[in-house]
Image (tube, helix red, strand yellow):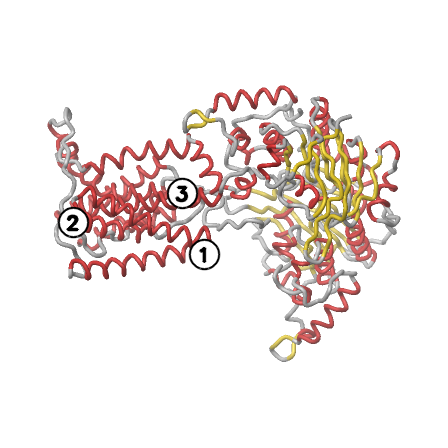
Amino acid sequence: MERAVVLKGITKRFPGIVANDGIDLEVKKGEIHAIVGENGAGKSTLMKILAGIYQPDEGEIYIFGKRERITSPGRAIELKIGMVHQHFMLVDRFTVLENIILGAEKRAGITIDEKNSRKMIEELLSLYNFSLDLDARVEEISVGQAQRVEILKVLYRGADILVLDEPTAVLAPQEVKELFVNLRRLKEEGKTIIFISHKLDEVLEIADRITVLRRGRVVGTVMPSEVTKEELARMMVGKPVFMKLEKASVPTGEVLLSVKDLVVKESTGKTVVNGVSFEIRGGEIYGIAGIEGNGQKELAEAILGLRQISSGQVTICGRNAGNLSVREIRDLGVAFIPEDRHRQGLILPMKVWENMVLGFHRKKEFLKGRSLNLKAIRKFAEKKSEEFLVMLSSIEQSIEGLSGGNQQKVILGRELSREPEVIIASQPTRGLDVGAAEFVHKELLKKREEGKAILLISADLEEVLSLSDRVGVIYNGRITAEFKPEEVTLEDIGVYMLGGEVKAGEGA
Amino acid sequence: MFLAELLASSLRMAVPILLTALGAVFTERAGVVNIGLEGMMIAGSFMGALGSYYYGPYFGLLLAMIAGLFMALIHAVNTVTFRVDQIVSGVAINILAYGGCRFLSLAIFKMATTSPRVSGLPKIDIPGLNIGFLKPLVSGVSPVIILALLLVPVSSFIINRTVFGLRLRSVGENPLAADTLGIDVFKMKYAGVLISGALAGLSGAYLALEHTGMYVEGMTQGKGFIALAAMIFGNWEPVGALWASLLFGFSEALSFRVVEGGAIPYQFIKMIPYVLTLAVLTGVVKKSTAPAADGVPYERGLK
């Protein structure tokens, strides 16, 4: 069997860490090769080396048997390596066609040869059995379709080796299925696919072989038929992981958060939350499942007072919170774990200890007269860092230097240590590795046992189902269905997430 | 006859706004806000007069465009290479142009605020249409007017149909995506800013050579800013900028006519173009859509 990619002893160092430490990897032509590992295991670094974004410090790269140096992204494309980024690199206002040809336009003089470009893309579409409307603007198409555009972009450039970085992170279960159908079709046509993920179920389903990375080293390469999910997880983490969460039965208390007929509008007048109602009692986790962009973010922000409510009511601990400021709402005992921790949860250039008291810096214990009591704050930060197992060199470090998981722990430490009654957790484990995610889950369950009300908004269905006592599915700003997690399957919920029916014509 | 004259006058008033607005379309589609267009027009008006004074009107136009280019290069170095705030850099350029022209005027013409009279381009009579009421519109037309009108479809074609245009737009919408596709983001941004400078310079020269026949300090009267409003009103499209410029030109032409009538205090009439600008910016901006990365400096290696 011909080998598409062979890596020998690839080492890449960054100041302070060795991201890749002597990595050997063989990817056969025409296989789907999954690379799994926790965040920080070196997956992304390795792929960026393949894509020509980073240069390895040591080691050799062979592409189709020839030793190569991939000096730039352009060189990677010449070597027929195409990267499908996790965050789509698309121009929203351009059409699908324009996005695909951008940077590699077929020319007729100085103008774009649209006819020939279109013909070539349509040939690709029919060869791989993709369906896409080339004249639709990217802002109008679904996430799954946008991903297909990304894949087509690299195919259009003649890629034979496709590197997909966490491709399923943003997709609904049905869309994941479609993606897998597409990937298998690509494989049949002889393309080689490198699939990066930390979702073990998916990896086991799609991959021909799986290489596990841990702390920059290869732990091993296995066939999916030979391992169980638990074994894979153990390889990734290096210690046994509890895949099932222990959920104690907790008596529910009073209604702490109640949302009634909530309507939120964008400044453009578009309704983004459209009559949402639910109640959460103490000791309860209410999960909201849904594909991103269906009003989850706006819902959380409206409850917190970050967004104006058009109509409806939000009651927190018995008080009408509709007209309160964010600060007043926070003082009612609301903790907020934002979905985008870089934008909302933290101030990246600021130090760990500063971030640890953000928003609570007015509390008596952190003040000395009118100025901050730095000593008390530092002490508090030290204590919380220890309690929440934040790995850091010092609390004087700026928070952008921490890994995502540790940043999230700082947010948890800050938000949960104020004895909140209501916790709004928005995508609390996004981008976290298995270990850190488990930590977050445990903390949330602990708060549940303490009788707090928790609103859990997550695109990760497994997370929602395993943590929540009740689950509402949000679609287009409405809660379209409500379940107890034990009553439903992933697939059922997936159908509701896509609007109650799998849209015709989207299937590939 | 009155109507045709009014239209002809509108067109003459619209041309400087149009030229600069076309430039603004290029720079903003590449994602760089260029509030320094006013200053580039000032530089163009002075250098146009200077060039024409010594070597004739064609050289004046050329010199004006070079001056605009040079000012734009400063803006591009500031904002694209060094990622200075685009508004700050633009304001600095406006001040630089104002002071620089005053200084040069004093040094060269020994007058701080005006140049001697200079000659403009030979006027053209458009043949065949020179009949009846159309006469004011087609006789004695400045070649720059014709050039400006031709530049509308040309710009539209360049931006919307060519490879260059597609890449220019991609840089203004999502520079990171463009960069990953091997497009030289910095080069495209420079191109957009430089084109805007050249056009603003030309526009300034039109004011000095074709309009008044001399350079007068402050002769741009904020037309660079009005051009930005026209570009926004025209939804970042050359054709839209044409209609918006004509509207502003019309309001200015109208203000001259009404002054002659004298019914309303003339200060109020003079306000029309500026009030219109404000109204446009508050009312229309909501409906128009700027390029997604307009005004945002692009830095490599940032997520």
- Mark 3 residue element: helix
**What residue would you read off at disc 1?**
B84
The mark closer to the camera, 1 or 2, is 2
Image quarter of residue A144: top right
Using residue B244 as the reference point, say whether residue A299 is left or right of it. Answer: right
Q: CA distance from mark 2 to mark 3?
A: 30 Å
Image quarter of residue B241: top left
Mark 3 packing: few (<14 Cα in 10 Å), some, or many (20+)? many
Q: Name the residue at 75% across, 27% down.
A: A2
In the rendered image, residue A260, in percent from the top left (x then y), is placed at 66, 48
Q: Amino acid at mark 3?
A: Ala
- Is A40 situated above or below B140? below
Q: Chain of mark 2?
A: B
Mark 2 packing: few (<14 Cα in 10 Å), some, or many (20+)? few
In the rendered image, residue B8, in percent from the top left (x then y), is placed at 18, 37
The mark closer to the camera, 2 or 3, is 2
In the rendered image, residue A454, in percent from the top left (x then y), is placed at 75, 53
Q: Are marks 1 and 3 in contact (CB under 8 Å)?
A: no
Q: Could you tell which of marks 2 and 3 lies nearer the N-terminus? A: 2
Q: Name the residue at 44% across, 39% down.
A: B168
Q: CA distance from mark 1 to mark 2?
A: 37 Å
**What residue would you read off at disc 3?**
B191
Using residue A178 as the reference point, say whether residue B221 is left or right of it. Answer: left
- Is B134 situated above or below A429? above
Q: Are marks 1 and 2 in contact (CB under 8 Å)?
A: no
Using residue B146 as the reference point, say whether residue A83 is left or right of it. Answer: right
Q: Could you tell which of marks 1 and 2 lies nearer the N-terminus? A: 2
Marks 1 and 3 belong to one chain? yes
